[in-house]
Amino acid sequence: MKKAILFLETMSPLHAGSETSLGLVDKPIQREKVTEFPVIYSSSLKGAIREFIEENMLNDDKEKETFYELFGPEGDGEDNFASAISFTDAKILLFPVASVKDVYVYITCPFVLKRFMNDCKISDINKFDEINIENLKVNKSEVITHSNANEIKINQNNNSSIILTEFQFNVKNEKNDKLIEKIKEFTGVSENKICIISDDNFKYFVKYHTEIMARVKIGQDGTTDTKKGGNLWYEENIPIYTVFYSIINVFRSRNISEKRKKDEELIKFFEEKFNNLNTFIIGGNKTIGKGLIKSKIK
């Protein structure tokens, strides 16, 4: 069995929509029930990747056969079988927030980092053997940065602080350079733009600092009158530069016929296509430039 981590960074605002609207926003994004963090459900992610590879990356009939072996065949025929690849929900790892210095930074928190490390451990992707963050804590007024992140700091009276939107945080005098450099190694994000804030502050930002956009459908008379086909609604989007991760597992083929592909063929196809996936689109707003994703696999 092959295991890997797929990192996803939004290159345009993303609307991975939820069916439930509980507030003023008519079309909210998908969120985890317990944490209320933004998430991309595995069904949305897998469907988008399947569609993109099928439409853009298959060169011949042999590749199509391997593709259907990996993702499962189309239709509901008697000879159908389950796919040999699984995706977990794409969980948030880094969230972009406006900064007074250096335009914006990426925020994360101890809860998110511990969960990420635990997901890697459960999936036997051991990348953090030398790093222990069990005792990592950040107060509400503090932020942890890389020791060289001078571009985002405001220095005054021998103290450093960072201003994110309208909130000011004191830079904690605690070195976690190895942890931040490991995040950079995974995601490609500059270590000088990564900030670790408290769990509560992180939850506040990901809950209240998404994008809310008014959408309008013009009716027959050029107005939004619902009686004449018009409509006005509010839609929530995950902002550009948000980073998610999903754990991928490639299993043995579920095809029981004589044409069953060997495990090595599926893994080779998986590695080749996913290493060249680069960008694809998630969500229902691709005709207006939303949902462009840059991907990276580890």
Image (cartoon, rainbow, N blue to C red):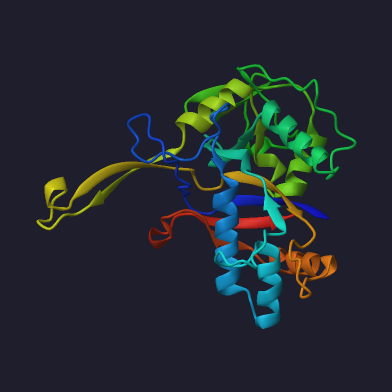
Question: Quick check: 188 left or right of 281?
Answer: right
The image quarter in which residue 60 lies: bottom right
Question: Quick check: 156 left or right of 263?
Answer: left
Q: Can you see residue 47?
A: yes
Q: Is residue 131 above or below residue 161?
A: below
Observer-nearest of 85 and 207: 85
Question: Quick check: 39 left or right of 144?
Answer: left
Q: Is residue 161 above or below residue 187?
A: above
Total numbered labels placed on residues in the image: 0
Which residue, as the protein is rendered here, is positioned at the far bottom? Answer: 60
Which residue, as the protein is rendered here, is positioned at the far left? Answer: 221
The image quarter in which residue 168 lies: top right
Q: Position of residue 153 (x, y in %)?
A: 63, 31
The image quarter in which residue 121 lies: top right
Q: Can you see residue 225?
A: no
Q: Residue at x 76, y 75 (%)?
A: 259
Which residue, as the protein is rendered here, is positioned at the far right? Answer: 130
Q: Residue at x 52, y 25 (%)?
A: 204
Q: Position of residue 203 (x, y in %)?
A: 56, 26
